[in-house]
Amino acid sequence: AQQILLDSRPEGLPTHDNFKLSSLLLPEVQEGEFLVKNLWMSVDPYMRGRMIDRKSYIAPFSIGEVLEGGAIGEVIESRNSDFPVGVKVTSMLGWRSHYVTDGSDHTKLPETPLSESHFLGVLGMPGMTAWAGLNRIAELKEGETLFVSAASGAVGSVACQLGKLMGAKVIASVGSDEKAVNLKSLGVDAVINYKTAENLSAALKEAAPQGVDVYFENVGGEHLSAALDNMNDHGRIAVCGMISQYNDTAPTPGPSNLAMIIMKKLRMEGFIVFEHWAHYPEFAKAMGQWLATGAVKAEQTIYEGLASAPDAFIGLFEGKNRGKMVVKLT
Ligand code: NDP
């Protein structure tokens, strides 16, 4: 079997030197255990945080240890009657080709007409994040204006589409014209390319002259500042992520206009999707229907082979993905 270890902690943007591909001999499958061949693995921005040695909501990765992350695999040998050969499972044991397990923290995948990889994306953690942020944190209402940053990605593309289904006017920000064209084809009302916009705050004002009621924050920094400038009274900011800061090597200064929170009586609330997981069945049922009717389109960018996983991960910080970034392992 093959696996990818954290070889050193990144300084700034991760590089290939931070990762190491290694081979190992798997132990024999004992009574109660089964052997999984991973088919898909996820790379997600939060993994950058786990590469830093610090206390957080999830333990840091250790140097010299195999990395972890969402994965989908198939049971290819089994001495556990709950997980017979052929069953597909989700786990947090990504970044490796095969592994032996007793099945703890494994879930069997339901039957789906879609590619099972979507359980790492639109039907999984990122999709649930978009749904929870809009419904449970921001409480987006029909007729409101929603602004979404990193809008072409796994969370953002779902947030934009759900925003439209909830009857909002949706303004998005992305890092390329090609991503902007694609989001428009998904029904987004206006898209800003933050890389070519001269002044993000002015561009947002032009796209949303009526102001912004809900900001779905994925980026931080200048994006947060622009959103604060354009928020309407009693607006809500669902703080999901701040990807523009994950590779910073020095503390990032906060926006200079935070006082807008007072003047506009805003509510700004951070959230971690796992605290909302009790609502996953409700989300999955609705999302399954939206996907079946075409009301939501599932997008993904696929890298091939375990060895490409570091590239896929680094690519998240370079805007290489449209929709969910996944690695296909077979
Ligand atoms: P994405 O699929 O959106 O991938 C990252 C995207 O972010 C890139 O494609 C790129 O798109 C954009 N980006 C990268 N660097 C920058 C930058 N410096 N400035 C602006 N945009 C940038 O990732 P996810 O959808 O998985 O995650 C999106 C956000 O949600 C992240 O901040 C993540 O940490 C957060 N998150 C939070 C969760 C929670 O529970 N709170 C759960 C899951 C995700 P572009 O080309 O447009 O620049």
Image (cartoon, rainbow, N blue to C red):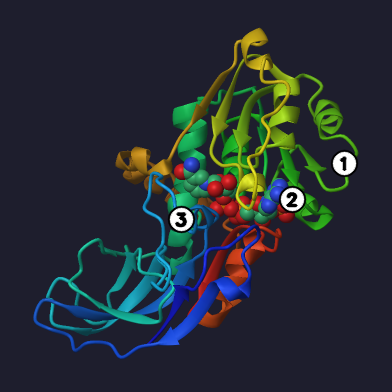
Residue at 49 percent of width and 55 percent of height: 52
Residue at 45 percent of width and 75 percent of height: 5
Rendered position, 41 above or below 243 = below
Proximity of marks 2 and 3: CB atoms separated by less than 8 Å:
no
Report the front residue among 207 and 241. 241
| Mark 2 or 3, nearer chain start | 3
Image coordinates for residue 326, horizontal then vertical, percent: 54, 67
Q: CA distance from mark 1 to mark 3?
A: 32 Å
Q: CA distance from mark 2 to mark 3?
A: 35 Å
Question: Mark 1 sits on what residue?
Answer: 197
- Ligand 1 neighbours mark 3 (CB distance < 8 Å): no
- Ligand 1 neighbours mark 1 (CB distance < 8 Å): no
Rendered position, 110 above or below 267 = below
| Mark 1 or 2, nearer chain start | 2
Rendered position, 33 above or below 91 = below
Question: Mark 3 sits on what residue?
Answer: 50
* Residue 279 quadrant: top left
Question: Mark 2 sits on what residue?
Answer: 185
Q: Closer to us: mark 2 or mark 3? A: 3
Q: CA distance from mark 1 to mark 2?
A: 21 Å
Residue at 86 percent of width and 28 percent of height: 202
Residue at 44 percent of width and 85 percent of height: 22
| Residue 301 visible to the viewer | no
